[in-house]
Image: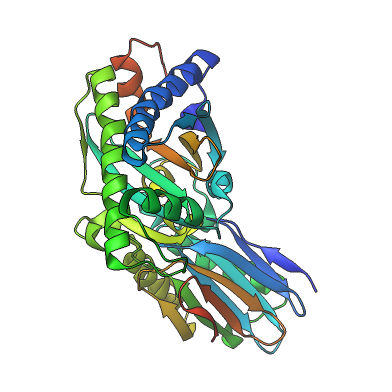
Amino acid sequence: MEYFTKFGDFQFDVLREVGNIGAGNAATALSKLIQKEIDMKVPQVKIIPFDEVADCVGGPEAVVVTVFLRVEGDCPGNMFFILDMASARHVLQQIIGEVKDVEEWTEYEASALHEIGNILTGSYLSSLADFTNLNLQPSVPALAIDMAGAILSYGLLELGQAGDFALTIDTAFFEGNEQVQGHFFLIPDPESLKTLFRSLGVPFDGDY
Amino acid sequence: MEIIKIGMADLGVAKSPDRLRTTGLGSCVGVVLYDSVHKVAGMAHVMLPESSLGKGGEIAIGKYADTAIPRLIQDMKLAGASTTNMVAKLAGGAQMFAFLGKSDSMRIGPRNVEACKMALQQAKIKVVAEDTGGNCGRTIEFDAATGLLQIRTVNQGVKEV
């Protein structure tokens, strides 16, 4: 755990606020898209072994709809927007109308989910960029519908080269009656934390 | 019969009638070694190809193809297996996000598979079955009694190799 030894409560609070701001803006965007009220849970900032990363979305074998993008620029990292299958279907119903209740998605539906993920992650990142004054550039987002473990492991490749733990900023959101629930995951690369904290004037003497 | 779970970047050994299982393989590769004479099996959930990629001080042995496979062989020998009997089966190494394939770090799946094969070749262990590549996640379970590897995917159901 050597990369995260200098972490205190204050640093955790700051990262929770990062999750709040990013996901807050994204949740507003989602709320406009589906014309329903979206609530957010308090962001969870955790330093956990790789194995446990998929647990908060239902375990490594849970099938999820995910839009993934790489964040480039001053503060590189990985960003995921995750919906379970039922929630993805509800969101689609709100936006494009009729959706068949089958396991297979049509190209049109997949493309709509892709675009929703694109809008929401974009909104997360741009609010974060405004807040920190950092240059954050999203890669072209990619869509995958598969096992959570298989998908989230992509967010761990950079971290895997540096240590055995992942710092994740996980913000769960849900619609009033919980028909739609999902997560925004931000997993900064190890060397990005220093930049992030510096941009916010937060003391951090992690030994990188 | 017990099912031994192997986590990400981890490895383990089982004897008949136990089973080895690892879940949610994406770009990671599940390496299974098996000595059918002594009915000893080993499984590793390899995340990255080479330990030289590591930036940190200490290395998790199970994380890299070039460190996990030699250790797996060693652990299996301690459990009574012999290298000459060992064969390998591979699963995983997918490319979950198709068009991110340009950058090297996103091509990690195929690189993991290549690195595993190279490490196996160095140990003179033959790959008798593989289900690698593609763009789907896999969960695998290996039966140390029969030597069969069960591979489950979301869209293609279950198959055995």
Image: B147 above or below B8: below
For image coordinates 42% across by 38% down, the residue present is A184
Which percent across, then down, holds residue A53? Answer: 53, 45
Protein image colouring: rainbow
For image coordinates 47% across by 23% down, the residue present is A16
Image: B14 above or below A76: below
Image: A198 above or below A178: above
Front position in the image: A186 or A73? A186
For image coordinates 50% across by 55% down, the residue present is A86
Which percent across, then down, holds residue A57? Answer: 54, 47
Which percent across, then down, holds residue A113? Answer: 32, 53
For image coordinates 43% across by 19% down, the residue present is A17
Which percent across, then down, holds residue A52? Answer: 58, 46
The quadrant of the image that shows the C terminus of chain B is: bottom right
Q: Is residue A161 visible?
A: no
Place residue B106 in its image quadrant. bottom left
Q: What residue occupies the far front of the structure in this picture?
A: A98
Place residue A31 in its image quadrant. top left
Along the horizontal axis of the image, is A23 left or right of A8? left
